Amino acid sequence: VVHRALDELEGITVASAYAGIASLAFRSIGDVFSFCASCMDERSLSRLGTRMLEGYCGLYDRTGRHEALVLAAAEAEKLANSKMFVTEEYDGILYASGGVYRRLAEADDSEEHANKALTLLFEALTARTAEASPLDHACIKGEIGRAYMALAKIKNPVKCYHSAASAFEEAGKILKISSWDSALYRGKAAGAYTMLADEYCRGKRYDDALQAARSALALYPEAVKFLERRSPEGLVEVSSDQGFAHTIVSEVYLRSRMFDLSLKHASLALDAYSRASDAIDVKARPERYATLRANMGLTHVNMAEIHFREKRYENAITACDSAIAAYNEAIRIFDERKKDKPAAATKKHLKRANDLFNTM
């Protein structure tokens, strides 16, 4: 009955069109938990505590309500300091708490929260071994990968992206009996390798960037295959990341004056970006669509530069026109949404495309 009540309150919090009602339902979740906690035995209470953490995380994922994470973190601290941590529910609480702090690390760019998430998750991993609990072990590995991805944006990106990719790949291998779950985690591993390749490019370690991007590209097809049928949102993210991986490879080959290979991967990047653009709900996610269009513009410019160097001027002009059109559409959306930073960056890219066009 208590769990059903919490489900209903969470549903109202998400679905209510009235802010006051949604807020009342949200606050009632904590009241229900506090009232029932005094009536439960240790095991039931520890399970309900885990359920509360997962519920608050779910609310944050669906609504972006940061307060849900704050309340979840406070509850995680209470659970950590209670005697319930000596029960067999210990590992479940650790896993749920790790998910809370991982989300806080992402939301607040917090190194402290990311490290706390990893500490909790590695402790949970020790309790749920791959031999005894393969499914739980894989899920914890996946959460560790997400925590490393959050930490990579703050500190030691190369090391963290490596660790994230490894964790995701291990989770995918453990879940190989489930094609869907395996493909999902392998797609996340591919995304981590892509970000690793980007970091190597920033550090001018182009051979390492090429190797990381190839590792990513080897993993994407399986993820795309399953997401095309089951998850348009997942397909957008995976296809966008796949396009970025091809773009990195194209730019590395361009620097090495290997123009044919650069053009090949630029074309593959455009195919991936186009697949993502077709799958996205533009009205629901205009900024994500604008970012895709900006990425497509960058790829078109790279192709235009190659055609120009090879004296294929008509192809260069066509590619430049496509780049300028993509950039202008992205800028329009960013300006409408008052996203000044991405708009300014895209305008710089647009200037580069216009300058190249004017030299032809």
Image (spheres, grey):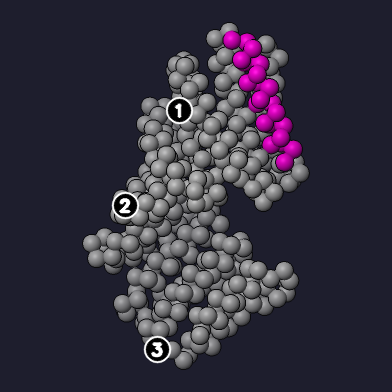
Residue depicted at x 40% and y 52%: 180
What count of labels does the image hold?
3
Q: Name the outermost residue toward the right.
A: 336
Residue that mark 2 sits on: 176
* Residue numbers of the magenta segment: 312-333
Numbered disc 3: secondary structure: loop
Position of the C terminus, as image quadrant, is top right
Residue that mark 3 sits on: 41
- Amino acid at pointer 1: Val
Residue depth check, mark 2 versus mark 3: number of the one nearer the observer: 2
Is 269 located above or below residue 239 in the figure? Answer: above
Crowding near the residue tagged with mark 2, few <14, some 14–19, many ≥20 C-alpha atoms within 10 Å: few
| Residue 137: x %, y % from top left | 32, 61
Mark 3 and mark 1 lie on one chain; the one further toward the N terminus is 3
- The quadrant where residue 62 appears: bottom right
Front residue of 348/240: it is: 240
Residue that mark 1 sits on: 249
Query: In the image, is residue 316 part of the stretch drawn in magenta?
Result: yes
- Amino acid at pointer 3: Asp
